Image (cartoon, grey):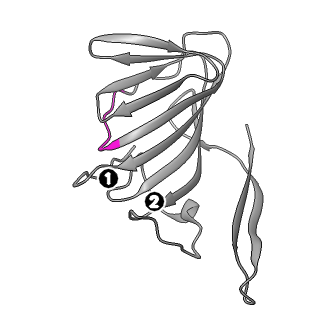
């Protein structure tokens, strides 16, 4: 799974331009999970930076900032119950995903969106096909960074 990332910027003449245009491969995570960090901000409101946030050590969520990532979950992905200090927008792009909660679960299909508000959860692909999810994590006031 590779995704093309196009990042805009401003050139030395003050004109809008394409700063980066590249295909990005996922980083391996736990068994059955691949992760592509698309962009992040260190604080909110966001400030413009000339750095590529993909070079940062950002973990799952960043205190005071935001993270945008794509993730691929293989069938039978390893369990990872976790909670982040963030409001997360999770979008199912392809496949099928079960979001497990301490009390209940929901099955997501392409186009479904979850607003995940700092609760303990696990992502479980019980289907026979990979699932691709998009995540936008926005830090909560006073929240901590979350590692992998």
Can you say whether 17 is above or below 68 in the image? below
* Residue 80, percent from left and from top: 39, 27
Can you say whether 52 is above or below 36 in the image? below
Mark earlier in primary sequence (1, 2): 2
Residue at x 27% of width, y 16% of height = 102
Task: State which region is magenta.
Answer: 81-86
- The question of residue 75 being in magenta is answered with no
Left-right relation of 68 to 7? left
Residue at x 32% of width, y 40% of height = 84
* Residue 11, percent from left and from top: 73, 83
Label 1 vs label 2: CA separation? 11 Å
Under tag 2, what secondary structure? loop
| Viewer-side label of 1, 2 | 1
* Residue 136, percent from left and from top: 50, 44
Work out which quarter of the rendered image holds the N terminus and state it.
top right
Displayed quadrant of residue 57: bottom left
Can you say whether 37 is above or below 64 in the image? above
The residue tagged 1 is 145
Work out which quarter of the rendered image holds the C terminus and state it.
top left
Left-right relation of 120 to 148? left
Residue toward you, 125 or 76: 125
Residue at x 30% of width, y 36% of height = 118
The residue tagged 2 is 57
Residue toward you, 122 or 74: 122
Left-right relation of 59 to 130? left
Under tag 1, what secondary structure? loop
């Amino acid at each position: 799974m590779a995704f093309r990332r196009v990042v805009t910027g401003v050139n030395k003449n003050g004109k809008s331009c394409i700063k980066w245009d590249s295909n990005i491969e996922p980083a391996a995570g736990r068994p059955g999970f691949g992760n592509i960090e698309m962009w992040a901000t260190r604080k909110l409101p966001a400030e413009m930076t000339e750095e590529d946030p993909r070079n940062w050590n950002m973990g799952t969520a960043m205190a005071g900032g935001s993270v945008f990532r794509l993730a691929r979950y293989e069938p039978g992905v390893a369990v990872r119950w976790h909670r982040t200090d963030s409001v997360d927008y999770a979008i199912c792009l392809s496949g099928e995903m079960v979001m497990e909660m301490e009390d209940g679960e929901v099955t997501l299909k392409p186009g479904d969106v979850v607003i995940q508000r700092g609760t303990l959860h696990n992502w479980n692909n019980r289907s026979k096909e990979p699932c691709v999810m998009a995540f936008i994590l926005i830090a909560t006031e006073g929240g901590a960074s979350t590692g992998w």
